Image (tube, rainbow, N blue to C red):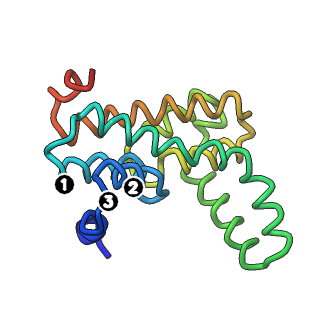
Amino acid sequence: MDKTALVNWLSSHGLPIEIIIFLFAMTPIFELRGAIPVAAIFSVNIAIWKVFLIAVIGNMIPVLPILLFLEPMSNFLSKHSKIFNRFFEWLFKRTKRKIGTNIEKYGALGLIVFVAIPLPATGAWSGCIAAFLFGIRLRYAFPSILAGVILAGIVVTIVTYGASSIFRLF
């Protein structure tokens, strides 16, 4: 099911566009980078600042649970299942390879930049994995990921709605 069909299906079942934006922003595939364009395509009656705020909040909702539970869950599942063990080995190896040395070298500042770049496989979910892999503590990881999500939101909003949109956010 593509994005358009999914949004049409959700809205035809009575879900307001605000909830659709929020749900898209929470998912690891779309995150805020997909939620803001979805809002622009499917709703002309919602303020840009509201789209931005809903997308940022939705994108950040899974971050704290992931940061808190990724290590114990991956350890437990890897220990009790060969499939999960292979999956987590692949995921962690791939994430380390994709990130390179920037987070290792710059720590929380590198994490901000990594999350802020609005490209596939960068974002809050990948940022949580990177924070875990590179040992960035929660008190640094959460604000870094939040800053990256806000920066990515600004970039995606500008690209989606145009440069004048940044002034309509506030």
Task: Name the amino acid, label 2.
Answer: Phe
| Residue on which the image places disc 2 | 24
Label 1, secondary structure: give it: helix
| Residue on which the image places disc 1 | 42
The disc label shown at residue 15, or none: 3
Label 2, secondary structure: give it: helix
List x then y, in percent, for residue 18. 32, 47
How crowded pointer 3 is (Cα within 10 Å; few <14, some 14-19, many 20+) is rated as few
How crowded pointer 2 is (Cα within 10 Å; few <14, some 14-19, many 20+) is rated as many
Label 3, secondary structure: give it: loop
Q: Nearer the viewer, residue 28 or 170?
A: 170
Of pointers 2 and 3, the one earlier in the residue sequence: 3
How crowded pointer 1 is (Cα within 10 Å; few <14, some 14-19, many 20+) is rated as some
Nearer the observer, disc 3 or disc 1? 3
The disc label shown at residue 115, or none: none
Viewport quadrant of the N terminus: bottom left
**Horizontally, is 73 left or right of 5 in the view?**
right
Of pointers 3 and 1, the one earlier in the residue sequence: 3
The residues tagged by marks 2 and 3 sit, at their Cα atoms, a distance apart of 12 Å
